[in-house]
Amino acid sequence: MAYPSLSIGSLRLSDPVLAAPIAGFTDLVFRALVRDFGGCGLIYTEMVSAGGWIDGRIEPRRLRGVPQEPKPLGVQLWDREERPLEEAARRLVDMGVSVIDLNFGCPKRRIMGKHAAGAQLLRDPATVGRLVAATARGAGSTPVTAKMRLGPTIHTRTATAVARAAEDSGAQAITVHGRTADQSYGVECFRPGIAEVVDAVSVPVIANGDVACPKSALRTLRDTGAAGVMVARAALHKPWVFAQISAALRGDPVPATPSLAEQRLLLLRHHADLVAREGDPHGTVLMRKFAGRYLAGVPGARSFRERVSRAADTAEFREIVDRYFPHDTTSAAA
Ligand SMILES: Cc1cc2nc3c(=O)[nH]c(=O)nc-3n(C[C@H](O)[C@H](O)[C@H](O)COP(=O)(O)O)c2cc1C
């Protein structure tokens, strides 16, 4: 039986499978790649500083191309002040974005410490409520969502109180990454913590953390009762994973993992698109971090990673990819 559809406010998603905001990765080129594979109900930009944009008066690089980009598209903002969030939301509406997300989960020292934002706000549900309300004022009828971790520390799990404050202030969906800010990725995502948020609010909850394939998506949905799943790291080396998870949720046959030869073509296209946008060698330098995530678990992966992390320009990048990835489209899948 197909999994129920997911709506965020008035926006009905094609599939209850979302692509996470990932700073340094979910740029315009990557988002286009994910869209082409299909199966992704909503994709988010990298997080954008509302204050840096509004007070700095320079449009962030991370918003380049957003007005022209196909929709639906979510933009994630972070800040701890109401005024820039309200104004940023107003401008995002003018750009035609479909959803405005607020970051209450970033564990980075610079964001939590210097700016007292991101996951630091999990200590203060009342402020979260004010920030959501301000963003919703600027957003008008465009849905506002909130993305959070389970709490600032393992001893301070505040997600249910924060999610309630966000909902009471107008958030139309909540994404929960099932770890606290002080937990790195070393521990497994704590799905019961996500389930507690599902029980605490009536807006849809999107479960995030360790979803990497149809099996982990189905297990996450079953264990949490969430309305959808969000994928981050797995998407970086498997941008086709959304199509696979969505097919499984619909009860359709799961599309095969692209063969290594098909992955080679994908890498070359991704690189070419980055170079077309950013020029060479900058496009090649940007591509290094994406390419290094491919070939996981395949013999030669480490050597490929080492070499591609130093690729200087297009010619060298292509030479390395050609050496490690077969050209023959009939070769076995990874
Ligand atoms: C390199 C990196 C950058 C990230 N950037 C953001 C971000 O900009 N905004 C955000 O809300 N979460 C960010 N995250 C967290 C992810 O969106 C996600 O919550 C987390 O990785 C857990 O999901 P996963 O197990 O599918 O990776 C980032 C994670 C990584 C690894």
Image (cartoon, helix red, strand yellow):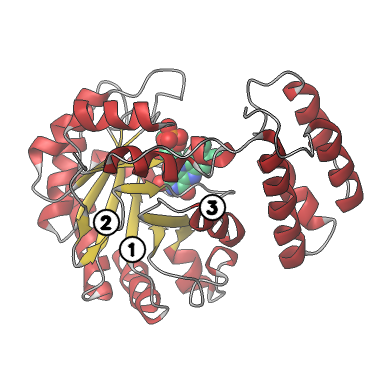
Residue 26, numbered label = 3
* Residue 105 in view here: no
Which residue lies most toward the front here? 330
Helix, strand or loop at label 3? It is loop
The residue that label 2 is drawn on is 145
Q: Is mark 3 within 8 Å of ligand 1?
A: yes
Neighbours of disc 1 within 10 Å: few (<14), some (14-19), many (20+): many
Label 1 SS: strand
Amino acid under disc 2: Thr
Picture layout, residue 132 above or below residue 25: below
At label 1, which amino acid type do we have? Ile
Disc 2: CA contacts within 10 A as few (<14), some (14-19) or many (>=20):
many
First in sequence, mark 1 or 3: give its number.
3
Q: Residues within 10 Å of mark 3 (few under 14, many from 20)?
A: many
Q: Residue at x 38, y 46 (%)?
A: 118
Residue 100 — which label?
1
**Image point 75% across, 30% down: which residue?**
305
Query: In what quadrant of the picture does the C terminus appear?
Result: top right
Q: Nearer the viewer, residue 67 or 37?
A: 37
Q: Which marked residue is nearer to the observer: mark 1 or mark 3?
A: 3
Which of marks 2 and 3 precedes in the sequence? 3
Image quarter in which the N terminus is found:
top left
Q: Position of residue 201 (x, y in %)?
A: 10, 44
Q: Name which residue lies at 38% across and 82% down.
A: 94
Measure how far apart labels 1 and 3 are at the Cα level: 15 Å
Q: Amino acid at mark 3?
A: Thr
Q: Check the image and report above or below for 73 versus 284.
A: below
